[in-house]
Image: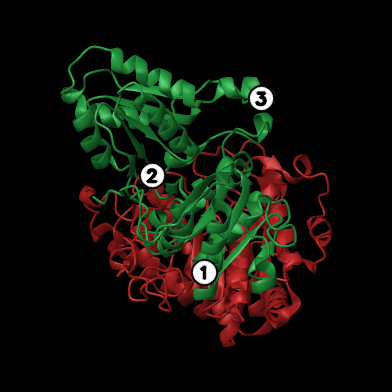
Amino acid sequence: MSKSERSLLKDMIRIRTLEERCAELYGQTKIRGFLHLYIGEEAIAAGALPQLRDDDNVLGTYREHGHALVRGVTARSIMAEMYGKAAGCSGGRGGSMHLFDADRHFYGGNAIVGGHLPLAVGLAMADQMQNRDRVTACFFGEGAMAEGEFHESMNLAALWDLPVIFCCENNLYAMGTSLESSESETDLALKASSYNMPAWRIDGMDVEAVAAGMERAVTTSRSGGGPVFLEFKTYRFRAHSMFDPDLYRDPSEIEEWKSRDPITSYASVLTERGSLSQADEEALWAQAQEEVDDAVAFAEEAEWESPATLTDHVYGPAPTRPGDDAKGEPILDPDDWAGDGIASNREVTA
Amino acid sequence: MTVHEPAPAQSAQMPSTMTYREAMREAIREAMQEDERVFIMGEDVADYGGTYAVTKGLHEEFGRDRVRNTPLSESGFVGAGIGAALGGMRPIVEIMTVNFSLLALDQIVNNAATLRHMSGGQLGVPLVVRLTTGAGRQLAAQHSHSLEAWYAHVPGIKVVAPATVTDARWMLRQALADPDPVIVFEHATLYNRREPVEPGPVDLVSAAIRRRGSDLTVVASAGLVHKAVEAADALSADGASIEVIDLRSLRPLDRPTLASSVARTHRALVVDEGWQSVGLAAEVAASITEDCFYGLDAPVRRLSSVDVPVPYPKHLEEAAIPTVEDIAGAAREMLAEGGTDG
């Protein structure tokens, strides 16, 4: 098993293991609020994210546990966040839907459908205006394509040649509403291509296809080719959230997609190639189990934040007194404010 | 607490005068000269020069990347401003009117205001949004409203309303220095106002006493500050001494300055161009009542716009929003009410 094959399979297994545990913990009321599972869609995060550099920007939706994990956010801090503990990657303030990690340029965890697409445009603008060759990968579901913010963002990104990779995870249902009943044009890549940008359809159940498509998109975008739209065709095996009785999908449809499980499919491919033994695969599942066990133990032990800190992080550190920003000096004190718009006061996630 | 005294009437060196529009333009120019992270974007900010001509000529000086025309996509370009702020820029986003800003309300309320808290303090959004507000130009019900209270309701953002040319000249600098989103409301009737410009800097948090008085405090913001001063001047002929406070900052409210004024005058009239129901005046009046209840000689009174979409004809528009006569009339009635002069 080559290193890249191994890590693609490993990351999918890590996501699946983490999320299956999340579902259990939800049943035990350890995790509350909404919990949206990515099970079935793991090939996209596992295949796409490793094609990015550490300084590229990533934005996700409320179904982002897998993206955070593959991006390098630790299972410990993800689990602690879902518990609402201070050691969580968002200090416990966000929960399952709002995982953030500024050090990894992971900008959420955004739960207004389509609302983070304009942010991706702006992050890419900042890179372009500061002559940085970063790209911004923005993940969203096909439901976002009915939102005005999708269209405004696609237009702005194309108009200004911004290095945004629009990663549409088309799992065919916007909550309980099927693609056919929400889009006048169900060929999403065709629809996206009207914005004068490359738009490619990719089998989102095939992790190597995802990796190859994303790599090509990143190369295009980073080399000045402007934005790229990728449609990853996929399917979620679980309901929309833990509240969803899943009445709108035919069980036979779910079973048909499950037969294309990205993990078992890829394990079969690797076995056929002779690059994966049963022992190898078992070891990957066991390692993932260990990682998740450790994360749960960490989250269980972690401290709650004191209610005394409730109103922390509503506003940043008070700006210097008027007049302190002497002419010629930077307006903001770089000690208080990293050049990235990222505050240095990261005590909650230290 | 800083209290801005009015400029002495007979200054040895009269400061230069400029219009509110010129002051705002000069503030933008200075910010862009001093910090290359600063840029401005919005509808027609370049060739057209800005809907209210604030950015006229700036694109020639700074280029089209930094004075960037946007399509009519309020949500898109306000969100892009938030993203650019996250990415290390210091964006100024211009929105034509507060009415249009509602198309970007999702970005401002759900993203700009929440990202710092939701990320546990990892992110900040140092964004400045400039928008025009207010009635008085017969632009009817989709260009004339004063929705400052909608924004001032939201934790995570700061809201200011420069009423004077001096504040127009200096508030932007401080807004750009702020680590959080600052919404700057510019009353559209103020752009041609010409006044001496006092030296900066100014802060973004304190209210200013624009006129000293001892019988009643009128609290106002933006365009109504000048109407309140005019009303106070008119009443002085009757021997009434009216204090006028310019809120300057709508979030946070400078409650200590309000309280110390009302503690002296014992009466407060809050004027606001927004609608009365659930409005800014209600918040200010409640704050004064909480802070000064036992020192009041009369109930705190609100004078807001009538609860009606602003109509087109001039006489009806004037009937809908507080006028100098309305303010003077309300003040006169309050002064006639019971109580002592403290």
- Please tell me the numbered disc located at residue B251: 2
Classify 10 Å Cα crowding around label 2: few (below 14), some (14-19), many (20 and above).
many
Q: Earlier in the sequence, mark 1 or mark 3?
A: 1
Q: Which amino acid lies under the numbered mark 3 shown in the image of this protein?
A: Lys
Above/below status of A159 relative to A53? above
Mark before the other along the chain sequence, 2 or 3: 2
**Helix, strand or loop under label 2:** strand
The structure residue drawn at horizontal position 32% and vertical position 17%, both measured from the top left corner, is: B334
Residue on which the image places disc 3: B314
Q: Amino acid at mark 2?
A: Arg
**Tag 1, which chain?**
B
- Is A183 in front, or is A83? A183
Whether residue A263 is visible to the viewer of this picture, yes or no, is no
Same chain for the residues at labels 1 and 3, yes or no? yes
Q: The chain coloured green carries which letter?
A: B
Same chain shared by disc 2 and disc 3: yes
What is the spatial separation of the Cα atoms under label 2 and label 3, in whole angstroms?
31 Å
**Chain designation of label 2:** B
Chain shaded red: A
Q: Where on the picture, by quarter, is residue A163?
A: bottom right
Mark 1 or mark 2: whose residue is earlier in sequence: 1
| Residue with the most extreme bottom position | A2
In x, y percent, where is residue A232? 71, 62
Question: For mark 1, what is the residue?
Answer: B30
